[in-house]
Image (cartoon, grey):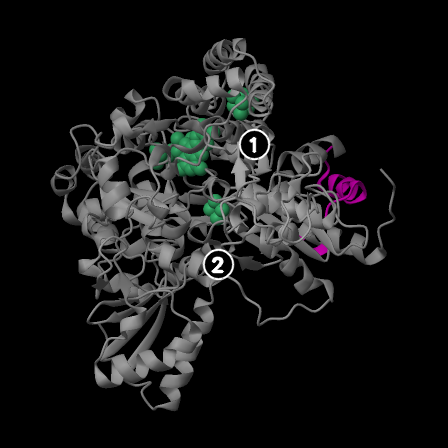
Amino acid sequence: MSRIKLSDSAVETIKEVCMSFGNQEGELINVLHQVQDKLGYLPAEVQELVAQELNMSVAKVYGVVTFYSYFTMIPKGEFPISICMGTACYVRGAEQVLSEFKRQLKVEVGQTTPDGKFSLSCLRCVGTCGLSPVIMVGEKVYGRVSPQQVKQIIAEYQEGCPSHEAKSA
Amino acid sequence: MSEYNFQILVCGGTGCKASESEEIRSSFVNLLNEYGLEEEVQVVLTDCFGFCEKGPIVKMMPDKTVYVRVKPSDADEIIKEHIVKGNQVERLLYRDPVTGTVVRDRQHMEFYKKQIRIALRNCGFINPEEIDEYIAHDGYMALGTCLTEMKPMEVIEQIKKSGLRGRGGGGFPTGLKWEITAKVPGDQKYVVCNVDEGDPGAFMDRSILEGDPHTVIEAMIINGYCTGASKGLVYIRAEYPLAISRLKIALAQARAYGLLGDDILGSGFNFDIEIRYGAGAFVCGEETALIHSMEGCRGEPTFKPPFPSVSGYLGKPTNVNNVETYANIPVIINKGADWFASIGTEKSKGTKVFALAGKINNVGLIEVPLGTTLREVIYDIGGGIRGGKKFKAVQTGGPSGGMLTAEFLDTPIDYDNLLAAGSMMGSGGMIVMDEDDCMVAIAKFYLGFTVEESCGKCAPCRIGNKRLHEILERITDGKGEIQDLDRLFMLSNVIKDASLCGLGQTSPNPVLSSLKYFRQEYEAHVKASHCPAGQCKALVRYEVIEDKCTGCTLCFRNCPVGAITGEKREVHFIDQSLCIKCGVCFEKCKFGAILVS
Ligand SMILES: Cc1cc2nc3c(=O)[nH]c(=O)nc-3n(C[C@H](O)[C@H](O)[C@H](O)COP(=O)(O)O)c2cc1C
Ligand code: SF4
Ligand code: FES
């Protein structure tokens, strides 16, 4: 993995978060949640610093980060696209929607487009099964999505500023 | 109801929120202000009414009219017609999908007729962000009774007598669990509410927490009182932001009312609740894994015994219960154990909440007495199969459960019957499948889930499930052989026998049950390279039927990869090497000239 250098402000942020949990080893998951919230992702350098602050091994931090799917070591795109792969969405055709996204964006699940705009991931049941199949772009939920709609959804974000009127849910 | 003459209840559950319920609420509020009606009409954002299929839903009180698929722009008409003139807005009323007749209110909707709501009693009726509304609906009354009139053992006796069993999947008698935790000596004990809800396609626990967070808080305090715990922990998925924020509000309100903290209701009993966040791991729903996760570690299960009741969080006695289990407790105390035990079957008392989804007309959240048949759930409440298709199977218990076929439609739903039929109750996901669903592909789907979610601690689960998935992949790719069926069977049994935790012990169930009931479908895949449901892409071919093709070019224009060639008014041709089997040509063709084989 290529090394990055953490900015001073990032270092500061991480230290503050650890401190707010009393630098307790048992608070590791809470610490990681907050750090990811603030920095967007948890690359190796961040994990090393967290380990140092909580006085535990980097291996243990890495073990926890990779165990939980909520934590990510690669930065998400500007518009993260998540496809619900819960059972309800699956039986109503989520797989076809996913493959259309893959085809249009030319990325696999877990990857980000070269321009950093879109990243593609799967998640399990957003809890809106009534609208299945469901996808999310950032926080916005699109329901009853068909493969034919995919192109249009991507286009909404391509220009940069998504139009807030276009709501298909 | 309060001093208002009317209430407009707008569903603010996650499902309806995604379809603009916030905008609907604000347009009601703005218009009411504009018309000077704000003193007479109250607008309340409640939680899920359960009828998610037709969301966003708006309910008018006191006359209980239900409006479906409401848009913000409909607010004006609803106010002018319904509130001002007293006329129902016909076009927004729900139509019975079978008879086509208009259904005016909740009592007359088939969807609600067979339901009894205990755990969901307040969901959709009260504002979850207002403790006073909960209290007005008998909230915290059970807590008062317990703390002031009953000894801990008396409360436990009631819970035992009610016959309540854990709703998190296992079905362990709740009263007994409380008793065990109570009897273990310990200076510090914990009670934990399990909101990990990992079953994909299930959203019962989320809805209860979003719609009625105080019921869970009340029950946890009672649980603490009974077991001698002074601390409660709610382990909740980070993916449930709305539930988290409502829980936080509820906790703050309960503290402000002296219902949490020191000397609750002057009883000398101290109790408080903290929130712990999950981070997306299904196995963390398993109680030992959950406890390790709360301790900040990888969520790997450990061997039981010792059970958490004896040695759990930080090595202390810990009572873990599911959200829905908790939601039943206050009602049992208020209405009595005998009342509760009168509902349900001999060994399964009370009701169960199910998240009904899949190929069914009314997707939504339902609560039925145990002992209700699958047929009643699917046809009477669920409104039957979507698009008039044929019922094929229903899956209960999520990745741990099995498929139930038409022959089980009249089986009363309870813990024991479902187990006997090769599935399980699970936490309440219920996915209905129709003739277009390939059972091999569904089994593969669940195994894919298990492979991703296995914690990797033990070999049978980590490696065995991967191999199962590979065999299933081979079969759906048309590369399977008949011996694969025996391999699946043998391997499944090894995994079941040799895995450490409930995940591995149940993960082959979707394979075993589909092998048992749909063996011919597996055979068709391996013997004839044919997918009877037409779902396995590798086995499907799209071809133009020359006699029927008019050369309208519609398929040519719609094919996303340009696999179709042909001149106007001439027979078209599909290049199989380019075709991605998306099926658009089949859908678009007006002349039935595309053959799927
Ligand atoms: C793999 C696995 C996943 C589980 N997931 C959940 C879950 O999401 N929610 C839940 O309440 N219980 C879940 N359980 C059951 C818990 O281990 C535990 O039995 C339950 O929380 C106890 O509460 P109850 O007695 O009130 O049902 C799961 C069990 C296993 C083996
Ligand atoms: S059965 Fe699977 S999930 Fe359970 S402990 Fe073993 S590897 Fe982990
Ligand atoms: S399965 Fe996709 S929202 Fe529930």
Q: Is residue B451 above or below residue A9?
A: above
Res. A102 image quadrant: top right
Q: Mark 1, mark 2: which one is toward the viewer? A: 1
Can you give x and y, in whole percent of width and height, for residue B302 in the image?
A: 51, 22
Residue B326 visible in the current orientation? yes
- Quadrant where the image shows the N terminus of chain B: bottom left
Most common SS among magenta residues? helix
- Left or right: residue A97 versus residue B334 is right
At which x and y percent is residue B269?
A: 32, 48
Residue placed most toward the observer, B534 or B251: B534
Mark 1 → mark 2, Cα distance in angstroms:
47 Å
Q: Secondary structure at mark 1?
A: loop
Query: Which residue is pictured at 40% across the width and 55% down the height?
Result: B210
Helix, strand or loop under label 2: helix
Q: Which residues are magenta?
A: A37-57
> Which residue position holds label 1?
B540
> Residue B138: x and y, percent?
22, 58
From the viewer's side, name the closer residue of B94 and B504.
Answer: B94
